[in-house]
Image (cartoon, rainbow, N blue to C red):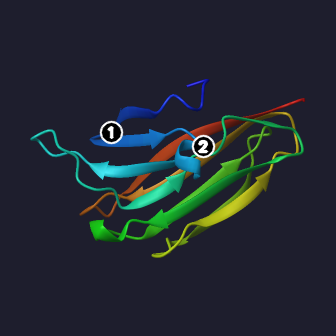
């Protein structure tokens, strides 16, 4: 996972499949997809695509988080994004319904050296419970 251009990272999470691509693929921001896992082993299309920020940034620079709704899936558009900094306090929180036609991005400044924990939450198709996906971005001295 250190090399951001290696391709797709597949991870099994809870009772579903989570697919995340590395940043910089196809010239656009990377995305993680919530998808339902059937007993037959095939994955249903995801509902809310989320931007996977860079794994490492310089202190004082920004990293990007964002959401977009995959309209063909027909599930819930609800999302939550929470970011806590090196002091383990949440300083960024957004929620709402993901847009249908374009990505909604936010640039977050890494003001201190350390780990920034990004938690995306969304609903799987047919479920009312929130599913969480966590990513860590490290801010380092450059």
Q: Nearer the viewer, residue 27 or 43?
A: 27
Is any atom of residue 29 visible in this view? no
Whether 85 is drawn above or below 72: the answer is above
Dot 2 crowding, Cα within 10 Å, few <14, some 14–19, many 20+: few
Tell me which label, 2 or 1, sits earlier in the chain.
1
Classify the position of the C terminus by image quarter.
top right
Q: Would you say 89 lies left or right of 49 here?
A: right
Alpha-carbon span between mark 2 and mark 1: 27 Å
Residue at image x 85%, y 46%?
A: 61
State the image quarter where residue 85 is shown: top right
Residue position marked by numbered label 2 in the rendering: 24
Residue position marked by numbered label 1 in the rendering: 14
Residue at image x 15%, y 38%?
A: 41
Task: Name the spot of residue 18 as percent of width and height, x first.
Answer: 37, 42
Q: Would you say 44 lies left or right of 56 here?
A: left
Task: Name the spot of residue 54 as percent of width and height, x first.
Answer: 66, 40
Q: Would you say 138 lies left or right of 1 here?
A: right
Dot 1 crowding, Cα within 10 Å, few <14, some 14–19, many 20+: few
Q: Nearer the viewer, mark 2 or mark 1?
A: 2
Task: Name the spot of residue 86 as percent of width and height, x first.
Answer: 78, 37
Q: Secondary structure at mark 1?
A: loop
């Amino acid at each position: 996972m250190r090399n951001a251009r290696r391709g797709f990272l597949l991870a099994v999470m809870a009772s579903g499949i989570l697919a995340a691509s590395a940043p910089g693929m196809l010239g656009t921001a990377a995305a993680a997809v919530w998808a339902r896992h059937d007993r037959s082993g095939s994955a249903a299309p995801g509902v809310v695509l989320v931007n996977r920020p860079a794994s490492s940034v310089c202190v004082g620079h920004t990293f990007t988080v964002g959401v977009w709704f995959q309209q063909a899936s027909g599930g819930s558009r609800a999302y939550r994004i929470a970011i806590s900094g090196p002091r383990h306090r949440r300083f960024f929180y957004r929620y709402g319904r993901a847009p249908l036609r374009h990505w909604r991005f936010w640039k977050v400044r890494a003001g201190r050296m350390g780990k920034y924990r990004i938690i995306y939450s969304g609903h799987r198709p047919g479920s009312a419970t929130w599913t969480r996906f966590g990513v860590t971005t490290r801010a380092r001295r450059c």
